[in-house]
């Protein structure tokens, strides 16, 4: 994949994040907010993988994608930073992952305000890299 693809993925990630934030702020659209936040985080990680010359895996698993950063390219302090991020945000990352497959898109019960807020916060942290 090319750097153009990475830039396109990042642009899409930012669009999904805007939709997530608007859905959350409108109130009551917590499923949509959380699902869009998950998509945004996933696309931003895939954009980074592409920039590093790595074909991103076809998965929605955020922690697996983050692990791919460490395993494939990021060594030294960058790799340690990602490991520390995953370790210290494990609960939040699981909530973000569940937002798409476990609750927000397909599951029951629906995503509540607190979980949506967590999903948005951790997604914004990922996109901020």
Image (cartoon, rainbow, N blue to C red):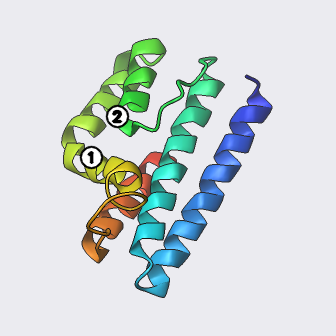
Q: Are marks 1 and 2 in contact (CB under 8 Å)?
A: yes
Looking at the picture, does residue 58 appear above or below residue 94?
above
Across and down, in percent, residue 94 comes to: 27, 46
- Residue that lies at the very extreme toward the bottom in this rendered image: 27
Across and down, in percent, residue 14 comes to: 62, 56
- Mark 1: secondary structure: helix
Residue 13 visible in image:
yes
Across and down, in percent, residue 11 comes to: 70, 50
Along the viewing direction, whichever of 44 and 81 lies nearer the viewer: 44
Residue pictured at 40% horizontal, 38% vertical: 62
Along the viewing direction, whichever of 92 and 98 lies nearer the viewer: 98
Tag shown at residue 5: none
- Mark 2: secondary structure: helix
Across and down, in percent, residue 87 comes to: 21, 36
Q: Quadrant of residue 52?
A: top right
| Label 1 environment density (alpha carbons within 10 Å; few <14, some 14–19, many ≥20) | some
Residue pictured at 45% horizontal, 52% vertical: 38
| Label 2 environment density (alpha carbons within 10 Å; few <14, some 14–19, many ≥20) | some
Tag shown at residue 94: 1
Query: In the displayed structure, does residue 13 sit left or right of residue 117?
Result: right
Q: Number of callouts in the render? A: 2
Residue 128 visible in image:
no
Q: Which callout, 1 or 2, points at the residue further toward the start of the chain?
A: 2
Q: Quadrant of residue 17?
A: bottom right
Residue pictured at 30% horizontal, 46% vertical: 93
The residue under label 2 is: 63
**Quadrant (top left/top right/bottom left/bottom right) for the N terminus:** top right
* Mark 1 to mark 2 CA distance (whole Å): 8 Å
Looking at the picture, does residue 113 appear above or below residue 67?
below
């Amino acid at each position: 994949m090319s750097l153009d693809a990475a830039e396109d993925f990042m642009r899409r990630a930012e669009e999904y994040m805007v939709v997530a934030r608007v859905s959350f702020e409108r109130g009551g659209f917590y499923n949509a907010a959380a699902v869009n936040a998950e998509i945004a985080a996933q696309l931003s990680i895939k954009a980074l993988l592409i920039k590093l010359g790595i074909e991103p895996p076809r998965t929605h698993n955020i922690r697996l994608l983050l692990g791919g950063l460490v395993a494939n390219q990021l060594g030294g302090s960058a790799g340690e930073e990602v490991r520390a991020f995953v370790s210290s945000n494990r609960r939040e990352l699981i909530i973000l992952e569940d937002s798409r497959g476990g609750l927000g898109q397909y599951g029951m019960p629906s995503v509540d305000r607190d979980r949506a807020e967590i999903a948005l916060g951790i997604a914004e942290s990922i996109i901020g890299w």
